[in-house]
Image (spheres, helix red, strand yellow):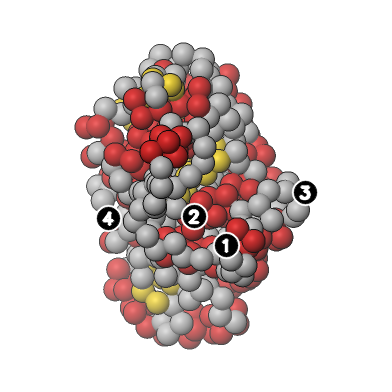
Amino acid sequence: MSNNNNYHFDTLKIRAGYNSSEHNGATQVPIYQTAAFDLYTVEHAQRILNQEEPGYLYSRLQNPTIAALESRVAQLEGATAAVAVASGMAAVSYALLNVGEGGSVIVAAEVYGGTYDAYKRLYPKLGVQVDIVNEINNLSLIRSLIKDDTKAIFIESISNPLNTIADIQALADLAHEHGLPLIVDNTLATPYLLNPFKFGADVVVYSATKALSGQGTVLGGLILESGKFDWSSGRHPQFSEKIYPLGNRSALEVFPSSPFTFRVKINYCRLLGAALSPFSAYLLLLGIETLSERVQKQSDSALKIALFLNSHPKVEWVSHPALESNGQLALYNKYFQKGAGGVFAIKLKGDKATTDKFIEALQLFSYQANIGDARSLIIDPANTTHRELTGEEQLAVHLESGIIRLSIGLEYADDLINDLKQVLDTL
Ligand SMILES: *Cc1c(COP(=O)(O)O)cnc(C)c1O
């Protein structure tokens, strides 16, 4: 099947975007490991180049394995289109540059460390200014930051690693009042736990490296659009700008329902070049086949483990949003009815030596800078994934030294609890 909106998520994640009869009956999406494609006739080449017919030219722009991935994830998310890129950082950066060109963006402070670093040290130099917001659900603060040249609001749906939940619906309403799109990094939630488009988001980005692929084998990223945002209001002239490779037509003219992702492809993938490899697309497709089953188990185990840790005398706090102490129960119940995913953070009582010992003594938690793997992982963000932040910035986003991030894998939950318990009891 290639296109059917009547099927449920679990059917789409196995079958959407691929029709075996177009690929010699191959059961699994084949890996088109080729840089370029035969064009045969000059006329055919022109039609593809002018976007007059879909077709394949060169794998930096289009490739059948990657197209199957893009179509599958677009259908899972209810998007009009998706574009796959080489990593989550490419997805975040291309989305923010594509929307922000020549202006500024309002961005959440509580985000992945690389994203925060790019706010400070990359985007302004490339012509996109950033206004960083520490409290993402403070609507009056955000409203006060909206200027004439503001182009978008960017958030993580549930933040890495402290699980701050953004009120997507309220933020989308606020953004739309001002003609702005809401862009959501939905990496921790995955399309299985949360569909930001349902609550009014306009663009969704993923690090597919994480729970979306789920086995720690591959780097990848995705950008998707709802197709509902009005890019022609005057705030985003780049979507109406004539592009030479489009035969002097604009992204909006050629792809009225998917100008955002199309423009990412034609300008950013084509010219900055972070294309996904066909083999990586294949691994992502394989991972997505088990997305619901993995993420549900990880969410369930994470909740069980969070409750255990929260009741342990050596643990100072646990960030899991299902815990009343975190004051997020209303948002958790609204946005995360199936669970909050496998990632959360804790702080132990004691000094740095205690934290270091805990990390090193665990047997079933690998010390790694990744999340969403089938294996349980642990890391100290202030010294690793979020070390780009200055001490002051770390404090502002509550990520000071001593905080530990856990990513719960697919092991038997009680084995993980026993491992944690044994080490905690020796501290
Ligand atoms: C890891 C991560 C990224 C960056 O993704 P890469 O695939 O590592 O480039 C972006 N956003 C979030 C929320 C992440 O966890």
Residue 146 location (% of width, % of height): 44, 20
Give the residue at mark 1. Answer: 23
Residue 375 location (% of width, % of height): 48, 76
Disc 3 residue: CB within 8 Å of ligand 1: no
Q: CA distance from mark 2 to mark 3?
A: 24 Å
The kind of residue on which mark 3 rests is Asn
Instruction: Specify few, some or many for label 2: CA neighbours under 10 Å numbering under 14, 14-19, or 20 or more.
Output: many
User: For the residue labelled by badge 1, is the local secondary structure a helix, a strand or a loop?
Assistant: loop
**Residue 219 in view here:** no
Give the residue at mark 3. Answer: 6
* Mark 1 vs 2: CB contact within 8 A: yes
User: For the residue labelled by badge 4, is the local secondary structure a helix, a strand or a loop?
Assistant: loop
Give the residue at mark 2. Answer: 64
* Mark 4 vs 3: CB contact within 8 A: no
Q: Quadrant of residue 349?
A: bottom left
Q: Left of 310 or right of it: where is 210?
A: left
Residue 208 location (% of width, % of height): 47, 57
User: For the residue labelled by badge 2, is the local secondary structure a helix, a strand or a loop?
Assistant: helix
Q: Nearer the viewer, mark 2 or mark 4?
A: 2
Instruction: Specify few, some or many for label 4: CA neighbours under 10 Å numbering under 14, 14-19, or 20 or more.
Output: some
In the rendered view, tell whether residue 80 sits above or below residue 250: below
- Label drawn at residue 387: 4
* Mark 1 vs 3: CB contact within 8 A: no
**Dividing the image into 4 quarters, which one contains the C terminus?**
bottom left
Earlier residue among tags 2 and 4: 2
Earlier residue among tags 4 and 3: 3
Q: CA distance from mark 1 to mark 4?
A: 46 Å
